[in-house]
Amino acid sequence: MNKFEVVLIFNPDLADNTLKSEVENFKSKLTTLSAKIVNEENWGLRDLSYNINKFKKAFYNFLQIEASGSIIKDLSKELNQSENLIRYMFIKVKKHQDLPTKLNYEKK
C-alpha cells in the first residue's frame, strides 16, 4: 500500500450538509476501493491564492490515505465529474506528516 495525501477544494457556495455529503461520498468511494483513511482534517473556508472558476474562496479538506496506486486513476475519473469540486490533488508521500497541520493551527 502506498501513502497519499489528498486535498479536495470545494465550491464556496455549498451548504454545510452538501459539503459534508460530498466528503462522505469521497470517503465511501475510498473504502469501496479498499483504501484506508488514516487521518482527516477540515481546513474550512480559505482564500485561494488565485481565482479558480471565478471563485476567490473555497472549502478545503485534507485526507491522509493508504491505497494502491492503481485506484488513483479511478478516483480521478469520478472526482472530475463532481460539479461541486473545484480542484483536487493526490500526493504520494513516504511518510504522513503529523496532524494537526500548520494550516489547521492558523485557523484557530
Image (cartoon, rainbow, N blue to C red):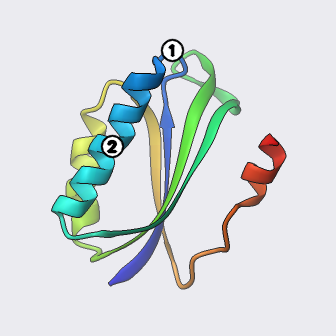
Horizontal side, residue 52 vs residue 23: left or right = right
Image height of 22 relative to 13, above or below:
below
Q: Position of residue 69 (x, y in %)?
A: 29, 74
Image height of 26 relative to 85, above or below:
below
Element at label 2: helix
Horizontal side, residue 67 vs residue 64: left or right = left
Quadrant assignment for the N terminus: bottom left
Front-lying residue, 50 or 20: 20
Horizontal side, residue 4 vs residue 80: left or right = right
Badge 1 is on which residue?
13
Residue at image position (73%, 50%) is 104
Which class describes the residues within 10 Å of circle 2: few (<14), some (14-19), or many (20+)?
A: few
Front-lying residue, 15 or 59: 15
Q: Position of residue 43 (x, y in %)?
A: 64, 43
- For residue 47, which quarter of the picture? top right
Badge 2 is on which residue?
24
- For residue 24, which quarter of the picture? top left
Residue at image position (28%, 69%) is 35
Horizontal side, residue 5 vs residue 35: left or right = right
Residue at image position (20%, 70%) is 34
